[in-house]
Image: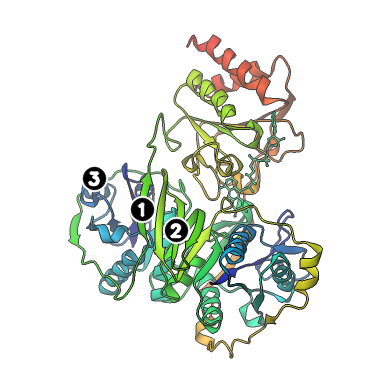
Amino acid sequence: MNVAVLVKWVPEPQGTPTLGTDHLLVREGADGALDPGDEYGLERALQLVERDGGEVTIVSMGPEIAVAAVQRGLAMGAARAVLITDPALRGSDTLVTARVLAAAIRRLGPIDLVVAAVESTDGYTGTLPITLAELLELPSVTFATSFDVIDGAELQAERQTASGSEALACPLPALVTSTTGVAAPRYPSLKGVMAAKSKPVDRPSLTELGLVADEIRSTQSVTGVGTAPEKAGGRVIEAGPDAAAEIADLLEEARVI
Amino acid sequence: MWIWADLTSDGLASSALELLTKARELGGEIGAVAFGPRATDAVAALGEHGAIRVYASDDDRLEEPTSRVAAHTLVALIARDSPDVVLFPSSYRARDVAGRVQALTGSTVMANAVDLPTIDRARAEILGGTTVVDVDLAGPRPHLVLMRPRSFEPAAVGGTAEVVIVDVVEPAGFVSASVLSRTDPGATGPSLDDAKVVVAGGRGLGGPEGFRLLEELAGAIGDTAIGASRAAVDAGWVPYALQIGQTGATVKPEVYLAAGISGALQHAVGMKGSRRIVAITKDPEAPILKMADLGVVGDLFQVLPALTEEVRRRTGR
Ligand SMILES: Cc1cc2nc3c(=O)[nH]c(=O)nc-3n(C[C@H](O)[C@H](O)[C@H](O)COP(=O)(O)OP(=O)(O)OC[C@H]3O[C@@H](n4cnc5c(N)ncnc54)[C@H](O)[C@@H]3O)c2cc1C
């Protein structure tokens, strides 16, 4: 079974991201890492190929420093990676990104399963994987809380819905987006980190991907940036005998009791 | 101007009425797309809130979980009637449909929008709601704009909508996912959308039993819904329907009380619009304290029962 896992390099997930004068997220020179949201699906994909055979290929688009995120995925156990880096892709919208990733996945040959996180930690659009599924004409299961492959032929998944959950079966090839529930990510071993250095990383150009200028033109441009109104901080007290009364006073002021 | 009306097992989602408020402000003819169970039942409410036309269908095929048929059907309607913009809510279903439509039409998708000042410019919150950006939208129409929940207040204006029969478009040779089973615990008590008070719990509650403390408090206050952080939901303590934040519900109650929640950016986007915020946390450095009107630093297992007692004493409940 061949699984493609989409990963993204994001600026330091614990840090405070900033916008540059061009209104784009500052990526160059920023500390960054593999998007923590991507590790869950990657872990699950690795578990499946370790059980059933096959290979996990990491697919990523990003700036040059995204190599770090790709390396971490390889250290966790992926067999190889594809990374697309091109200055023309800076500030790409979701459609352009989906086209680039679709072209990269088509080049991999037959893929049984595409795995992505529900959304990225930095951009959190939450539509990119499904746009990719349509470009690749794949059925999809989004927001999976668990997933499995049965006999190498069928994806079975539990997913969250607005008011409950559902269990789904889907013929392969298919695309699944995973929440943090699907698996607990492993920590790369030292051996894994060493092995990652010699694993193949394919770096195709946009021409090699067969993409023309029209297909990589972004449909969005940021024209203004402002800080969201911040609330003036309130009062902080220690939990003591009066804490309950103080909260109850606030509830009375708000006329909810 | 079109809006995507989400239909759930409880009927028309309130997001549809919020989107109609915005659509009316922008002017022009307003169409609503209602694909799903009992779609025709939703026509009256959509008309009352300003839709003049409803593309309604309760055909089962439009409900398939991959949303592919719904997207192809919507694209056929778009090709015929050429809307400039389709407003979507931020629900899972809407994201799935909008994402697939984008692949077919080459339209722009603007996610996490909080406003649409003109039909070619959206305002969105990024970086966990700390930054607001104005974004010019270009590319083939219609622009597909996903609005954050509760960005607009629903308001009825009176009116009736014409119903347009929808021809379902099924792409050939395509097998979708099929549903093996469904669980829908259904809502109990006031909903997160409507309750005057939301009491929410996080990892600090330590397990499902911790949520009993919140239920007791909610019962004492009255008109109170229970919410949760993602950490509590991912741990399986409470169902996903209770999740508040970027990938969950957005709430704006009179009072939001967070117990054992640190206040991560992704949680904050779902609750920072609350009228008053109370936080109980052990950690004096927790970001939630910066958002709170009243922050209590200490053990929630002491504060919550004491508070429930105090509220009972004052209300006589
Ligand atoms: C793409 C993405 C989307 C996300 N979407 C969401 C979302 O929609 N909603 C969401 O909530 N999160 C979301 N998150 C997760 C978010 O980043 C945080 O991890 C999460 O909100 C943390 O939950 P928490 O505050 O309950 O847990 P923690 O951050 O672990 O905080 C627990 C708090 O409880 C306190 N505590 C512990 N014990 C006690 C006690 N006895 N008494 C008092 N206080 C105590 C601790 O001091 C701490 O402040 C998302 C993350 C990503 C990457």
Question: Contact, CB < 8 Å: mark 1 with mark 3?
Answer: no
Q: Amino acid at mark 1?
A: Leu
Q: Amino acid at mark 2?
A: Gln
- On the image, numbered disc 2 is attached to which residue? A156
Q: Please tell me whether residue B169 is drawn above or below residue A143 in the rendered image.
A: below
Quadrant where the N terminus of chain B sits is bottom left
Label 1 CB, ligand 1: below 8 Å? no
Q: Please tell me whether residue A227 is drawn above or below residue B183 in the rendered image.
A: below
Foreground of the two, A202 or B100: A202
Colour mode of the rendering: rainbow
Q: CA distance from mark 3 to mark 2?
A: 46 Å
Task: Write down which quadrant ligand 1 falls in.
Answer: top right
Left or right of residue B130: residue B222: left
Question: In the rendered image, which quarter is residue B106 located in?
Answer: bottom left
Q: Amino acid at mark 3?
A: Gly
Q: Chain of mark 2?
A: A
- On the image, numbered disc 1 is attached to which residue? B180
User: Image point 77% across, 33% down: which residue?
Assistant: B284
Q: CA distance from mark 1 to mark 3?
A: 41 Å
Foreground of the two, B98 or A247: B98
Q: Chain of mark 3?
A: B
- Look at the numbered disc 3 and give the secondary structure of its residue: loop
Q: CA distance from mark 1 to mark 2?
A: 9 Å
Q: Which mark is residue B158?
A: 3
Regarding residue B316, the answer to whether it shows in the image is yes
Q: Chain of mark 1?
A: B
Question: In the rendered image, which quarter is residue B203 located in?
Answer: top right
